[in-house]
Image (cartoon, rainbow, N blue to C red):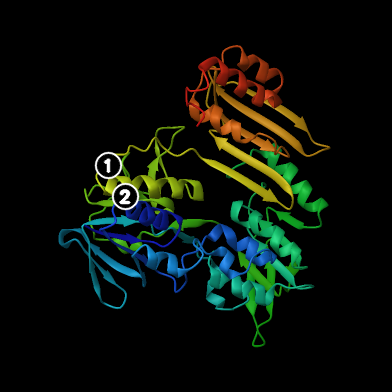
Amino acid sequence: MRHVIIGAGPAGVIAAETIRKADPSATITIIGAENETPYSRMAIPYLLHGRVEEKGTHLRTSDEQFKKLNIGLIQSRVDKVEPGKNSLTLHNGESVDYDQLLIATGSRPYSSNLDDLNSPRIQTCWTLEDARKIMEFANKGDDVLLVGAGFVACIIMNALISRGTNLTTIVRGKQMVRSMMNPTASAMVKRWCQKEGLNVLTETTIEGADCNAAGELDVTFNTGGKMNPDLIIVATGVQPNVEFLEGSGIEIDNGILIDEYLRTNIPNIYAAGDAAQGFDFSTGEQSVHIIQPTAADHGRTAALNMMGRKSKFQGSILMNVLDTMGLISGSFGRWQGIEGGDSAELLDEENYKYINLQFDGDRLIGALTLGHTDHVGVVRGLIQSQVKLGNWKEKLIDDPSQFMNAYLAKTQSLGHNAGVFS
């Protein structure tokens, strides 16, 4: 059996290793678009921070591990997939045939109008090559402009500050990290960043930008402000890599549409990770979850189904845990709540602590936490188990910090072997 995996990120690597563990004789090939050893994008901030070297970003300790597992690695972009021929075409014109295909091509940053300046001092922060260029221009005393204040932008703030840069971040709207926080939590994060010395400009966009012959940048904001940054990092969101599938017949919405077995509309083609639009555990609808835990779960499940194991995926729970310059926040499930649902809130603005819980009947369906690091993992367990809280719902509404006690009480009542919190 020839298993071909497009994408060398966590979803693709985990899928390949899962197949190899179950089938020593299968032919397995990973195709990655970058000229890099397979690595984790989530490790890039640690590289910028100086906590790891480039080897520390690699998903496995060396290429030898893939050789030992007899997993082939091809470094090339895929230009076309032809399901009718069970074949794909690489950028160099070569073709690769498959029996089972997994598309795990990940995502890429949105383009911006700054791209037209074609300056090495304007970068995204998504690849190892991006990181190398950022480290060249983001050092002690350098003025850095970070465009965006979402999840990815907030992850790299720590690293940029640790490098001794003078960092300014701008965001189009009123909120930082609005994809995972309500206005209360977002305002607290903004105050925290300002307290830590970060210049945060909300409701601010770049109105004009220029790069002179010497490579110097000149930026004008919609507010009338100006800046001459040594480096601009654009972190305004990402989108799935699916354009190469045009004309393939594979159904695409916001991402590649997949069923509960990670299968596309074509029986021997599967999709996983950032490029896939799969079922959301909380809503039952199909969504693109651009988070590494979902990619890992997708890769493992897709691999089992590619081998005919019939492993049904229960849906991914939207979960983000973020360290913003030392302030830990998390969002889980349907943290926005639902119409007619109850909620509970515990706020300590002075100490930057916040809990917001959302209920559907007596089930916990979503949560926001800020400044709380102890036992927050059990929040996911309470949501994912869909356990009925009974009188513990009222206790949590009175004191949302009691989620650990609720977890223990419901675990004991269901029996230690119930497995609902595994």
Name the one closer to the observer, 26 or 85.
26
Residue appearing at x 59%, y 31% in the figure: 379
- The three-letter amino acid code for the residue at tag 1 is Arg
Q: Secondary structure at mark 1?
A: loop
Q: Specify the label residue 221 is tagged with.
A: none
Name the one closer to the observer, 207 or 212.
212
2 or 1: tag closer to the N-terminus: 2
Query: Which image quadrant for residue 149?
Result: bottom right
Can see residue 190?
yes
- The three-letter amino acid code for the residue at tag 2 is Ala
The residue lying furthest to the left in this view is 84
The residue lying furthest to the top in this view is 391
Measured from the top left, where is residue 31 in percent x and y? 35, 66
Residue appearing at x 68%, y 71% in the figure: 219
Q: Which residue is mark 1?
A: 309
Within-10-Å neighbours for mark 1: few <14, some 14–19, many 20+: few
Measured from the top left, where is residue 172 in percent x and y? 63, 54
For marks 2 and 1, give the one nearer the viewer: 2
Q: Secondary structure at mark 2?
A: helix
Can see residue 224?
no
Figure check: 50 above or below 372? below
Within-10-Å neighbours for mark 2: few <14, some 14–19, many 20+: few
Name the one closer to the observer, 341 or 223.
341
Name the one closer to the observer, 145 or 310.
310
Measured from the top left, where is residue 361 in percent x and y? 53, 17
Q: Is residue 295 left or right of residue 88?
A: right
Q: Is residue 287 left or right of residue 23?
A: right
Figure check: 341 above or below 129? above
Q: CA distance from mark 2 to mark 1?
A: 10 Å
Q: Specify the label residue 22 is tagged with.
A: 2
| Discs 2, 1 touching: Cβ within 8 Å | yes
Task: Work out which quarter of the rendered image holds the N terminus and state it.
Answer: bottom left
